[in-house]
Amino acid sequence: MPLLIGIIALCAPRFVIAMLWLFSTWFTGVFETRAWPILGFIFLPLTLLWYSAVTNWFMGEWNWWQMLVLVLAIFGDLHSERNVSRGE
């Protein structure tokens, strides 16, 4: 089941964020305010999902490979937004 959610998250990250927000406690205790998850939902959904995954699965411990995946998530978010703005 987690693998299926991961695959869906790559295709439709905002859908997965909404489902996690509504039906689980995934984001509880990850952020101090509600502003960061809302901004992440709007601007950087893959980055938001990865940040919350590191916080939940790895107790917030950032090693080199967590940072590498974070950079890839940021590039993925920026690339998808660039394609949307071009109309592709």
Image (cartoon, rainbow, N blue to C red):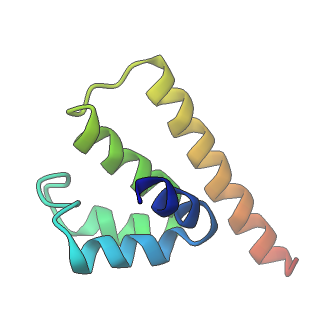
Q: Is residue 61 left or right of residue 84?
A: left
Of residue 19 and residue 72, the one placed in the foreground of this image is 19
Res 44 seen here: no
Question: Which residue lies at the image location 13% right of the left edge and 55% below the top edge?
Answer: 32
Of residue 71 and residue 14, the one placed in the foreground of this image is 14
Res 32 seen here: yes
Q: Residue 67: x percent and y percent? A: 48, 28
Q: Is residue 25 left or right of residue 53?
A: left
Above or below, comparing residue 56 to residue 9 in the picture? above
Above or below, comparing residue 67 to residue 42 in the picture? above
Q: Residue 88: x percent and y percent? A: 88, 77
Q: Residue furthest top?
A: 64
Question: Which residue lies at the image location 55% right of the left edge and 28% below the top edge?
Answer: 68
Q: Is residue 32 left or right of residue 39?
A: left
Q: Residue furthest front?
A: 1
**In which quadrant of the rendered view does residue 61 lie?**
top left
Of residue 56 and residue 34, the one placed in the foreground of this image is 56
Q: How many marks?
A: 0
Above or below, comparing residue 39 to residue 30 in the picture? below
Question: Which residue lies at the image location 30% right of the left edge and 70% below the top edge?
Answer: 20
Q: Residue 28: x percent and y percent? A: 13, 60
Q: Residue 51: x percent and y percent? A: 37, 46
Q: Is residue 31 left or right of residue 9?
A: left
Quarter that holds the N terminus: bottom left
**In which quadrant of the rendered view does residue 10 lie?**
bottom right
